[in-house]
Amino acid sequence: MEFEKIYHKYDVIIVGSGLAGERAALAAASSNLKTAVITKVYPTRSHSGGAQGGISAAIGNVDAEDNLETHMWDTVKGSDFLGDQDAIELFVEESIKTIYEYEHMGVPFSRLPNGKIAQRAFGGHTYRRACYSADKTGHVLLHTLYEQCVKHQVSFYNEFLVLSLMITDGQASGVVAWDLRNGGFHIFRTKAVLFATGGYGRAYKVTSNALSNTGDGLATVLEAGLPVEDLEFVQFHPTGYYRQGILVTEGARGEGGHLLNGEGERFMKKYAPEKMELGPRDLVARSIWTEILEGRGINGKDYVHIDLTHLGAEKIMERLPQIRDLAISFVGVDPIKAPIPIQPTAHYSMGGIPTNKRGEVVIDAQNSVMPGFYAAGEAACVSIHGANRLGTNSLQEASTFGRIAGNNMTEFARKTDFLPVDEEAVKRAEEKVKRLFENDGKTHHYHYKKELQETMYNKVWIFRNDKDLKEALSTVSSLEEDFLKNVRIDDKGLLFNLDMQEALEVHNLLTFSKIIIAGALNRKESRGAHFRTDFPKRDDKNWTKHTLAWRTPDGKTKFDYKPVVITKYQPTERKY
Amino acid sequence: MKKRFEIFRYNPETDKKPYFKSYEVEVYEGMTLLDALNYIRWEIDGTLTYRRSCRSAICGSCAMKINGRTYLACKTQVIKDIKSDHIKVEPLPGYEIIKDLVVDMDNFFDKLKRTKPYHITHKAPPEKERLQSPEDFKFINEAADCILCGACVSACPSSWAGKDYLGPAALLKAYKFCADTRDEGADERLAIVNDKNGVWRCHYTANCMDACPKDIKITDYIARLRNMLVQNKL
Ligand SMILES: Cc1cc2nc3c(=O)[nH]c(=O)nc-3n(C[C@H](O)[C@H](O)[C@H](O)COP(=O)(O)OP(=O)(O)OC[C@H]3O[C@@H](n4cnc5c(N)ncnc54)[C@H](O)[C@@H]3O)c2cc1C
Ligand code: FES
């Protein structure tokens, strides 16, 4: 089977139209570079729009004592000392500029009576520093950035699926994409390319993530022979709607919501007596799961309650209208009248494509840069979140490092030239698609996804151990092998082939999930979101280091480790 | 409990004309229409095609016609919201069909672009944020809820009649900027919407408000845009 191939040339190419991608695109386009964004959904449909709670910055509008130092310390501590402190320092400084810049772009922020941007409390932050817009913060940021991209004439390739990364003579030279709407390959040559492809929560059955968060960027990078970093760190958000996993924002706890077990007890007093419900996410999620495992879920089942009723109708309607709307639509509960059933849900991907604090992708333990290749946002691992992200730091990360990477790639693109097409990368993309069209397989791709997601949920979840992880690794390895031989798609047409798109996404999930598991198996300690029941303590001596993992040409995993950048704060015990 | 889903199917590559295909699905309390469509595609018929992403009513991908009414598939419960045992699912009316439930939204987005849908200021910004009172924020807060799902345009008789009509979503966007105390581009934008294909084409049928999954009072905002025009002239 032969497919059409269409060629393009842009000064810079950005893959992904969430906050990170759009912010980078804006940096390039406002410097008059010919800029294209390639995205598998319409830009305003990106996952960033789902973020509700807020975006952090120590601007001190509510708590005047707030300062950069404390924001940095909170983030380092939250990361369980796995965050790189040079990157965190830059992050907290630049985040203030990011907020004012957003305001100047016209973002509708909620306001204080004095007219300044309102800020609220969020878990793990010492001061109230989450700037917000009711409970649709990500939505208004995403729409505002899109509006700015329209203004600056960014070219959008909507509903295009990027399949491979081109590297020519050791330098990133473009991407190969599939046009979902019409079918056919598009080969984009460029001087600098940025991946802002979002997180990998869809490896799990219960997740708050959009259906499109399939970690495509990670798989693409691995297939190009480059490493990924710290994938074993997956954040489990304490409060997802029971069964669905759709998020109840932490804002619900920030506004004063209580967590109650089957006995009606505010159980957080046992686990975080001071911070209570506003303890860090990993701790709250583990506390809930412990209550459930010990039989104190509601009616002994695998969920607990978040109770907002005492906040009163007015506060709920004003501050948390979307939550109320969703609770009514998704679980049939009106939080003004009754508590909401919740369970922990896979939420945020701390790991990703390794970058330095300039947003340049690095490819080994010595932090050597791959010229022309950038990454930002949830797809990247810079790493400011280390082993555990604090709420509201990720919209900020996507925005701030989107800008930083965008500026640096603009500078790079100005002084470099187009490179020849990487034919290997074109071949890789073609093979993936042809396999699906030509395979006479018997097993629909959904079967593989379901098996994978169940395995990850049952064995690579909040509490991990050696036996489960080994079993999971073997299951997922055989799934991957079988997929290549036996996968089937039902739709073999060119037009908007969602069946094929999902099969390609499942392939991606299989490619990187093995690395989550193997990384978790190697890491014989508990840190942040990664908890090993057989190694329940943090081991600073052996494990204050980042995991780097490669996929070898025969499909095996190779590991290396690099030190954490520690500048100001030596690891200490993390207590809340 | 089982329900029967009659789903609009059309693949221009292979089908001479559209048809309805029927699927029987075991439904459960809490199941959304999007869950049902996913179930059909994953377990019964992989060729069924539609758009979806967030599944939490915020990305605007999944608007469609459900038993005659336009709504979001991910926000519609198949038991609680739909009493009938037969559920008819069709693409958003008024758009060109690409395949099955997927429609062409390019025109919708192009119309948005015609209203200068971005913040316009002439003054250099201060070092920090500009101030805005909570009351002034309220003027734009609800309009900013729009998820660009296209349901309003689909339900709007004026949009059916005039394909050049800017339509409710674009006008709502224009309102959002014009009503923002920080914005200085109202005159430029009002000049654009002051047109027979702009605010004057809205006949206040308010179908758009019924269709809006975010319950935005779109018609009211179009009326406010008209008011701004009238006041500007005085
Ligand atoms: C429900 C929810 C609530 C949240 N709330 C908050 C909050 O209150 N505060 C906070 O700070 N963080 C929050 N987060 C996290 C935050 O939203 C994300 O980390 C952040 O938005 C990620 O932005 P991004 O730009 O990196 O990626 P995304 O917004 O996920 O964008 C990824 C983009 O990549 C594109 N893409 C992916 N693969 C391909 C491919 N193969 N080809 C082409 N395009 C591709 C997609 O189309 C999309 O445009 C929340 C997350 C969830 C799930
Ligand atoms: S899937 Fe996003 S609005 Fe329905």
Image (cartoon, coloured by chain):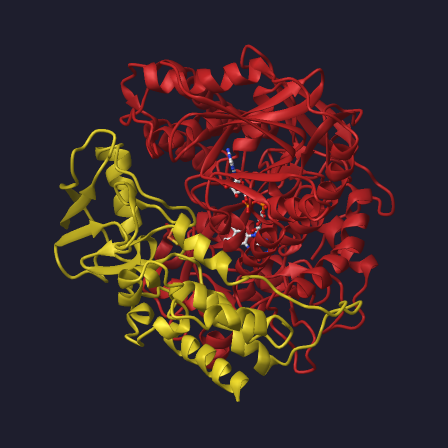
In x, y percent, where is residue A69? Answer: 83, 58
Q: Quadrant of the N terminus of chain A?
A: top left
Q: Quadrant of the C terminus of chain A?
A: bottom right
A50 relative position to B51: left or right? right
Of the chain colours in the picture, the one used for chain B is yellow
Asked whether the viewer can see residue A79, the reply is no
Q: Is residue A433 above or below residue A264?
A: above
Q: Residue at x 77, y 47 (%)?
A: A88
In x, y percent, where is residue A222? Answer: 59, 23
A14 and A447: which is toward the camera: A14
Q: Residue at x 36, y 52 (%)?
A: A301
Of the chain colours in the picture, the one used for chain A is red
A382 relative position to A242: left or right? right
Farthest residue toward the right? A568
Asked whether the viewer can see residue A103, the reply is yes
Q: Residue at x 54, y 56 (%)?
A: A51
**How many tags in the picture?**
0
Q: Is residue B167 above or below residue A393?
A: below
